[in-house]
């Protein structure tokens, strides 16, 4: 049996909210997802019953905190098909994870004349850290362009991906277009020229089964808050030998072996990259989110979202909205960006909000995408396991209402 979003909603207290007399129609999970009771409980239970710093104390609570925090790492490793928990670094999410790699790997190994290959569909989090690393090392940035329907244009890939390319950093799922680049093909092509590959999994991991061993990516980043977990939870997967070769990102407590006046030696990964008191409760909450997602099944979630995305795209197209991104649901996720008549996305989002409908309007931290499609902003409805066709119908009704109000 497929996923029943109505039953799923029962697990999320926020859906009891009534907003100005309207039920909550939440279509902004690409920005952040809601949290089921099991996640809220796991986090609260940690604070209520086990609260202590991890990896520091030998009293009972301290040992429990360490066990729970490390248990969360093991849960994440299994979820992502990682070979061992030591390949998972706990971070506050994708932005921190990419900065960690661009700093710890990029600044150490990039040299003048090396190239970093990005794509025009990247979120700013997968551009700016590389710009900083390039500025610090003399490396150059190059970009894979996009086709008119919002996929990567791989026509000139052989000119872009060359012996000079040292790293390919690519999203697994665009937060604006929904497009899913052909990761395995890109990873193989990058490895063939000796480049390492970082996959920005901020949107992919919450919505699609991911197996890092099968993908053979070198790094994968993810944000817990987009996959039913708490804010400031998340992580970085990295191949053992790469993590071991990298410099620390932040310096501080618990990431060192020994500190002298002159310098310090560092622990092995992942601890080398976990300076200071960590996001203990958040990672424990994220592990509960992962168990919840696994119990439902990532394939069932994907199947539900594909059907709902198709329903949304068809409904929007029937109303004359312009979809910005692919319309074929096979290689895309449920981030549906559109423009509707000439109504500014901010006006549209404000009008929808009056009916309890939450969508995001703006450039979605992806200004290269806006420029490519010649729009200042888009309205984006993004779907998740708790969304229903009723939610999409509410969006379409809301658009009709906005259309009547703003006119032509
Ligand atoms: N996108 C959106 O509304 P953080 O903020 O670190 O959890 O994730 C950053 C990030 C990186 N890559 C992609 C593909 C993303 O979608 C995001 C976050 C949100 O689209 C907030 S801007």
Image (cartoon, rainbow, N blue to C red):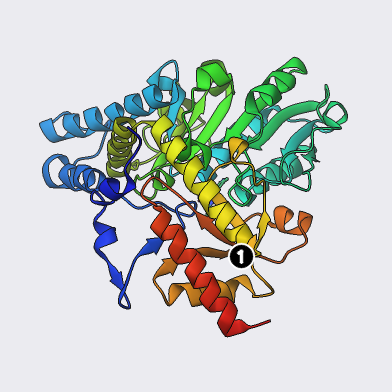
Whether residue 247 is visible here, answered yes or no, is no
Quadrant position of the N terminus in the picture: top left
Q: Residue furthest front?
A: 318
The residue carrying pointer 1 sits among few (fewer than 14), some (14 to 19) or many (20 or more) residues within 10 Å by Cα, namely some
Q: Which residue is mark 1?
A: 319
Camera-side residue: 310 or 333?
310
Q: Position of residue 347 (x, y in %)?
A: 57, 77
Q: Position of residue 43 (x, y in %)?
A: 23, 45
Camera-side residue: 183 or 367?
183
Quadrant position of the C terminus in the picture: bottom right
Residue drawn at point x = 48 percent, y = 47 percent: 308
Residue drawn at point x = 70 percent, y = 31 percent: 168
Q: Position of residue 174 (x, y in %)?
A: 61, 45
How many dots with numbers?
Answer: 1
As drawn, is 279 to the left or to the right of 59?
A: right
As drawn, is 361 to the left or to the right of 117?
A: left
- Look at the picture and state if 321 lies above or below 382: below
Camera-side residue: 75 or 278?
75
Q: Position of residue 54 (x, y in %)?
A: 26, 34
Residue drawn at point x = 59 percent, y = 23 percent: 217
As drawn, is 275 to the left or to the right of 247?
A: left
Camera-side residue: 373 or 21?
21
Residue drawn at point x = 37 percent, y = 29 percent: 76
In the rendered image, which quarter is residue 380 located in? bottom right
Whether residue 106 is visible here, answered yes or no, is yes
């Amino acid at each position: 049996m497929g996923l029943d979003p109505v039953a799923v909603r029962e697990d999320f207290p926020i859906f009891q909210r009534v907003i100005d007399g309207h039920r909550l129609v939440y279509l902004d999970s690409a920005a952040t997802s809601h949290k089921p009771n099991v996640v809220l409980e796991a986090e609260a239970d940690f604070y209520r019953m086990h609260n202590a710093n991890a990896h520091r104390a030998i009293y009972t609570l301290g040992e429990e905190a360490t066990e729970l925090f490390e248990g969360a790492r093991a849960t994440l490793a299994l979820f992502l098909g990682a070979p061992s928990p030591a390949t998972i670094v706990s971070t506050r999410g994708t932005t921190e994870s990419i900065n960690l790699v661009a700093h710890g790997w990029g600044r150490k190994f990039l040299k003048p004349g090396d190239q970093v290959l990005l794509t025009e569909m990247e979120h700013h989090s997968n551009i700016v850290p590389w710009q900083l690393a390039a500025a610090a090392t003399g490396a150059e940035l190059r970009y894979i362009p996009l086709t008119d329907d919002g996929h990567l244009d791989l026509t000139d890939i052989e000119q872009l991906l060359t012996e000079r390319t040292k790293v390919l950093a690519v999203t697994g799922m665009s937060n604006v277009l929904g497009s899913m680049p052909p990761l395995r093909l890109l990873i193989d092509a990058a490895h063939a020229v000796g480049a390492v590959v970082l996959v920005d999994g901020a949107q992919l991991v919450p919505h699609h089964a991911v197996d890092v061993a099968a993908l053979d990516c070198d790094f994968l980043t993810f944000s817990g808050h987009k996959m039913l977990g708490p804010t400031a939870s998340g992580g970085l997967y990295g191949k053992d030998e790469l993590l071991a070769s990298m410099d620390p990102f932040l310096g501080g407590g618990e990431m060192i072996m020994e500190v002298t006046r002159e310098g310090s030696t560092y622990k092995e990964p992942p601890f080398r990259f976990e300076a200071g008191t960590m996001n203990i409760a958040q990672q424990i909450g994220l592990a509960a989110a992962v168990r919840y997602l696994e119990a439902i099944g990532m394939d069932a979630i994907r199947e539900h979202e594909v059907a709902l995305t198709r329903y949304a795209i068809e409904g929007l197209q029937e109303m004359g909205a312009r979809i910005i991104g692919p319309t074929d649901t096979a290689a895309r996720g449920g981030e549906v960006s559109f423009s509707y008549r000439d109504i500014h996305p901010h006006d549209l989002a404000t009008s929808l909000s009056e009916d309890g409908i939450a969508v995001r309007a703006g450039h979605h931290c992806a200004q290269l995408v806006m420029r490519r499609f010649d729009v200042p902003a888009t309205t984006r409805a993004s779907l998740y396991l708790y969304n229903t066709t009723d939610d999409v119908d509410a969006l379409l009704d809301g658009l009709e209402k906005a259309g009547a109000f703003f006119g032509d």
